[in-house]
Amino acid sequence: MSAQENQKLFFNLTELVGQLRESRESTHKIRHLGRVRELPSRAELESILTGLFAALFPTHYGRPDLTDDDIDYFVGDVLNVTLKKLAEQVRRGLYFVSQEDLADENQFDQKAKDLTKKFAENLPNIRALIVSDVRAAMSGDPAATSVSEILLCYPGVSATIHYRIAHALHQLGARLLARFISEIAHSKTGVDIHPGAEINEGFFIDHGTGVVIGETAVIGKHVRLYQAVTLGAKRFPADSEGNLIKGQARHPVVEDEVVIYAGATVLGRVTIGARSTIGGNVWLTHSVPPDSNISQAQMLSH
Amino acid sequence: MSAQENQKLFFNLTELVGQLRESRESTHKIRHLGRVRELPSRAELESILTGLFAALFPTHYGRPDLTDDDIDYFVGDVLNVTLKKLAEQVRRGLYFVSQEDLADENQFDQKAKDLTKKFAENLPNIRALIVSDVRAAMSGDPAATSVSEILLCYPGVSATIHYRIAHALHQLGARLLARFISEIAHSKTGVDIHPGAEINEGFFIDHGTGVVIGETAVIGKHVRLYQAVTLGAKRFPADSEGNLIKGQARHPVVEDEVVIYAGATVLGRVTIGARSTIGGNVWLTHSVPPDSNISQAQMLSH
Amino acid sequence: MSAQENQKLFFNLTELVGQLRESRESTHKIRHLGRVRELPSRAELESILTGLFAALFPTHYGRPDLTDDDIDYFVGDVLNVTLKKLAEQVRRGLYFVSQEDLADENQFDQKAKDLTKKFAENLPNIRALIVSDVRAAMSGDPAATSVSEILLCYPGVSATIHYRIAHALHQLGARLLARFISEIAHSKTGVDIHPGAEINEGFFIDHGTGVVIGETAVIGKHVRLYQAVTLGAKRFPADSEGNLIKGQARHPVVEDEVVIYAGATVLGRVTIGARSTIGGNVWLTHSVPPDSNISQAQMLSH
Amino acid sequence: MSAQENQKLFFNLTELVGQLRESRESTHKIRHLGRVRELPSRAELESILTGLFAALFPTHYGRPDLTDDDIDYFVGDVLNVTLKKLAEQVRRGLYFVSQEDLADENQFDQKAKDLTKKFAENLPNIRALIVSDVRAAMSGDPAATSVSEILLCYPGVSATIHYRIAHALHQLGARLLARFISEIAHSKTGVDIHPGAEINEGFFIDHGTGVVIGETAVIGKHVRLYQAVTLGAKRFPADSEGNLIKGQARHPVVEDEVVIYAGATVLGRVTIGARSTIGGNVWLTHSVPPDSNISQAQMLSH
Amino acid sequence: MSAQENQKLFFNLTELVGQLRESRESTHKIRHLGRVRELPSRAELESILTGLFAALFPTHYGRPDLTDDDIDYFVGDVLNVTLKKLAEQVRRGLYFVSQEDLADENQFDQKAKDLTKKFAENLPNIRALIVSDVRAAMSGDPAATSVSEILLCYPGVSATIHYRIAHALHQLGARLLARFISEIAHSKTGVDIHPGAEINEGFFIDHGTGVVIGETAVIGKHVRLYQAVTLGAKRFPADSEGNLIKGQARHPVVEDEVVIYAGATVLGRVTIGARSTIGGNVWLTHSVPPDSNISQAQMLSH
Amino acid sequence: MSAQENQKLFFNLTELVGQLRESRESTHKIRHLGRVRELPSRAELESILTGLFAALFPTHYGRPDLTDDDIDYFVGDVLNVTLKKLAEQVRRGLYFVSQEDLADENQFDQKAKDLTKKFAENLPNIRALIVSDVRAAMSGDPAATSVSEILLCYPGVSATIHYRIAHALHQLGARLLARFISEIAHSKTGVDIHPGAEINEGFFIDHGTGVVIGETAVIGKHVRLYQAVTLGAKRFPADSEGNLIKGQARHPVVEDEVVIYAGATVLGRVTIGARSTIGGNVWLTHSVPPDSNISQAQMLSH
């Protein structure tokens, strides 16, 4: 073998780069052309979530040795760094999905700061909701021994905190970012809550893996779900040309104090009346009145 | 715009810090007051788990190029670092959940070392159990081609190793730590096994996502589960004041050589007799005798 | 307490190292003896996957500010680094599973380069398939607002991209590596697709957690699955000595344009005819003709 | 000791923060008020230098396994990332030292890009100069065995490469950045060359520690210096109010092919004529004609 | 070659470990026996120095985008983390050098906190001294263009800041730590100032490489040094048994407003009178009165 | 501004890449053509040095909490990792400088292992020499308070340890690697000792910055040097064609127990007789007999 051959790569890099460029260009609708619009960064969002968790519960998610003397400095500095980072990601998200002319590019910076400011003002309320969720977990699971165990060891609670943050951003218009956060939560916890869903205080998901809550679901106070519960859509209406109609209310309404056990599937814009219990693995596509007790009939063949 | 304005933040940091402080103080029951008790650290626990996995299976989870000449140095050094770290996290966990007087603070260091010492002595037994689990996987899955594939590519096996470590810590009294480990495993594998559960040798979970095994479940030898199987509680008895009664046996007993297929839900303190087969998606809330074969009746509407 | 005592460790390290060595030696079948064969590295594989994702969709998974002027340099450099790393992991995987004599050790380097070269040549095709999957997601989910949202926020799409890479490697013979990649995808997304499965273009999994697709499954064009769908094996035939027979076709065939809703379980070498709809939580162990509409009968007890 | 006391910090954080704020405010001239002007970042500059070194000598400072097939992708991608980073640091530097009104803030982005573009165009020339320096080292040191040894192991050569980059930036007006780079080089190599100095091709510093070359020094072709040589200013003229007059030519002119041995000190705007040799530890404050041979008289007392 | 041979390391690890153990044991005086006393950690000290620099000059060494609204949170949090880390390193240093009985081990924690508290109280004074040093640099170097350039680009100033911190710790009794800091500064800047030296306000070292200032040197106000100046000891008196007598004043006293040019060496307990100028490369071993102007005679041999 | 323009980079990347390629090709002598020969990696060498320092002095440079029970595991594992890494860098160095034919490429792996094995066998001797150096520092500096202070805070000692390692590699033939290590030491400590120099036991350099010791210097037992001492070459003999003659003895011989004070310069193959003292800043180019006391005459002009 000659030295010259030895110097060659074992694959044809230039040809491959060219083919991938062709592939990108032939599917050009897959990204915006004409200007560079940076997508939000997953790594930055994960860092922002770490910061928000730490600001909300400093000794659980921040530094465990904080005292009354130093905790505000920690919270202040974490918030300062985190909210600046968030504003940049919000800016990216707003700009990316915008249809507007390039001339307006600079406006997104101010829009993002305004949105982030409102989100910041909302943080105390978000914290209050999360505290209600933690208390619901404490009273809802006989295995729970302390608030700290709940904050550290309950994926359903972690998913709910992610949701409360994502929902606040969604309501303020940062929808791509909110979805990205819900996906991060999904990846960590196995719980998939669309940020568009409306969930009231005192919400608890136990175990959690496989729970799916759709975009237009509405959930009352003190609702409890178990793993693998789906609150989904039944069918997707299409317009006359066969395109999906987006944005319609198509997921369940779950009223206050409902409990839904593992594996139950509730589909469509149905209402589960207050204080109802839906049994495990139940398949439900119609509304049930308050105080219903629905369970799967059982068939066994020995 | 004046320079002075430019220097301002785009949100009111001081006000926000104050509101979050108020929120923390108004929910003061959410953390222990009066002394700083550091919580265990997730990052440290993940590092400890990496170390224990490496000490137990050095070429699979440690360094793949180890030989007979150097493997003991690797194992010894990893164990040394890992067990010291573990003792510190055990100390934190014991101290955090303790009700005792401050004067006793120093005792937790010794208690943690004693507990960690016992855990260390137990490691060869833990390894033997895991070997039995790996063999069960090898004989239970036709797609498995080698022990290495099982150790590297089977989330159910990974979850079981985590469980065996967490359970040993749970039995020795490090319950918060054990729960934390089970949550780490859950996050990685989608399998949620409470460290209080008792699981005998030769245990195999295939695929695994969505499996939930409750705190008081008891599982015999050579049991095999598939994804999304729940061994849960049926109801939670409350005392006369409506508070949940904690600690009662409320999860299933699964005897030797039982197989439970995907999505099956077994609830309550029922017994699945030895060698039974529980079909997929079955909903089971009563005991079945040995050698039962339970499957869901099927209803189709074309 | 004497100083000498103080210097001791709080556990018996040497004894423990010895016991673990004994444990390894007594279970010696658990790893290959006689020569050091390094296992593939999970960290390297994760880095390789990051590189392949970035090379395929540079602005979504690589760097979001790339322009027409610089994108090829990025793609070329990422591919160069990534494919060299891949060749080394392929080499490890091939060597590890080989039965061949030591004398042949050096051949694996060339084999791995040849295999990696073929994989590289296949990348444009892989990208085309993924583009078809993304388009299927866009047209299949009313909540989807843009291609970017789909690439960043849909775990089912992420799992599918992982599968397309793993399947290409599996077909070329890098089976251990392919399985390892499918496990990494499973851990991140909750979706477990065996790399041996054959899946045609336009595949979409929504939500995804708990989906299991077995080794010999065959899936047609434009198939859509929801969370917790299992395409599994019904039973595992054993030979006359009770050993599992490996490699037989034992998972479903799903024809073009089938939709399978959340929690449905299809087991065995059955065929779901084209354009059929399988309802949520359905348990199906026989073939159904094209255009079938299968749903679970519902039993409620109020 | 009460629990409340235990929670206190062992120092008074709030008082200390207040005192440091007072200290900053009382020395307010020490930073620009009225607007936030970010300083260049040392970490970013170090990353930029790593990138430029790698782009200039890819196999020595970049990746040692590059071949003709892949080297341009590496160089292109490294340059792309590095020059974008450089433009941002140039922008910071220009803005920071500017006296201009806030309204003009946005102009610095374009100015920085223009400057960086010119710097980029200059890179091939910079490389040619460095190649001449490396060749001078090869012919000037009997201990040198290869070009690679010189690029990897000669701090004087490393300092010269840093200088050539810093000088190019200095000439284009990025003076703060240029000085910052010279300080980074000084810290790494012990050689302190002001970026304002003019140094012709074929420059070689052997050993290097302690060499100081002042802002207005002029050095001809093929000059060789040894460690601890100073080319400094003799005195600093002050104006009538006692303020130093800045910017005057006050450092030596060293003509072509001069050699200056270790520890020699040349001060003031003197000229060392071409081909002169200045001996070790010589103290020189007047000009010498070409072909001079200056050495320290030696006095020994036994 | 047999497989068994292949598994061997290419060196004898066990023998080597044994020999090194023997070597350690035969030189047992080289470390304290009988109890584990952890040495301070260089990495921790570097992190502490980074923190102190950032707390003292937040926009130069911390985060360049801080505003009046957020700067105190940053300073407070950095100080909090840094001073806790410092207390631990002080504890290690005090314990390590102590001669005391093991029974007293716990006292060092409190001692270290007390010492760190005093150091913290001293920080505003330290900052004031450094500001005087920066102003001296600004007025002493015609090449200096701004305070920021001085803080970022002057190794002599960096060395002086390190010295001011180390000296404060030295005075409080943390001598091992103080020396460790001076060595870190030396490594970064080439300037070696013993923390025991006493240096008044307005101190400036230009260029700096090779400056050495001994343990008992005393330096007045507004003194300026150039590179390679030594303020050293002339000889080391030994006692009757030949052991060095430690701690005696043996380095120069340099009075106010003295300037010492590059390469000058001043040895022994001599006094340089106020306002004197010591020329470059001068070798001085006796005192000189105020307003002296000492320079090296020059001998040239053409 | 059109969108298309916006997408362009602000510099011409492709042109620049082309020019740099041309520049590399036109200076092709600057690297080996015809085959890829990877250079040793600075990062790897730094990691190897960290490992060797830790293996030699485990509690000072490794982990400070090691006890008799665990120290051998630490040493064994560190050595194992470090020596394998070293063998790879040795291989690169040997291969890089080789003139041999490609066919022999594989031999360098075995050569490197053999060389590394010998180096490993030499480590106990290296340690013994370093212990003698540390003792010399302890008895030579009145400011030294403990062996630990010397190991942690004396750059001259750090430089000497680096030299002892580099010299051992140099003697075994790994010359490029040895030089690389000496440059790393130089960068950290300001002390430049060529690995070819021969230095006997009990060597001590105080302060150290600016010390230069040439390739063919020979230094006896218990020699002490201060900062900025040069043991250099006087002139470089060239052959009839003007090329430097490499490898001749051209640096001083320093006999036992000599002390050389700061800034002294000794040039050429001269001999400093045993027990001599060379004063600061002395310039010496001829031999002196044993017990000489050389000092610079002093000239002062007031």
Image: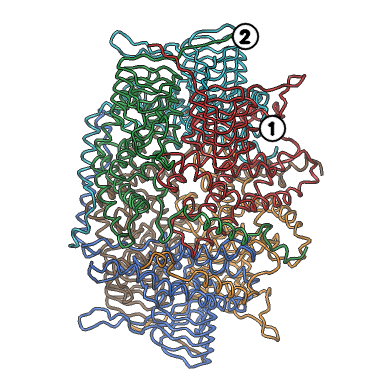
Chain colours: A orange, B brown, C blue, D red, E cyan, F green
Q: In the picture shown, does residue F225 fall above or below B212?
A: above
Q: Amino acid at mark 1?
A: Thr
Nearest the viewer among B222 and A102 is: A102
Q: Tag 1, which chain?
A: E
Residue A299 percent across, percent down from the top left: 41, 82
For image coordinates 44% across by 65% down, the residue present is C187
- The residue to which callout 1 is attached is E145
Nearest the viewer among A196 and A130 is: A196
Of mark 2 and mark 1, the one earlier in the sequence is 1
Left or right of E34 on screen, residue B37: right
Residue D135 percent across, percent down from the top left: 49, 45
For image coordinates 66% across by 27% down, the residue present is D250
- The residue to which callout 2 is attached is E291
The nearer-to-camera label among 2 and 1 is 2
- Tell me where residue F144 sits by quadrant: top left
Q: In the picture shown, does residue D288 fall above or below E254?
A: below
- Tell me where residue C130 sits by quadrant: bottom right
Left or right of C19 on screen, residue D13: right
For image coordinates 67% across by 61% down, the residue present is A93
Q: In which quadrant will I find the N terminus of chain B?
A: top right
Nearest the viewer among B125 and C280 is: B125
Residue furthest to the top: E289
| Label 1 element class | loop
Q: Is residue E50 in sight in this rendering?
A: no
Q: Residues within 10 Å of mark 2 (few under 14, many from 20)?
A: some
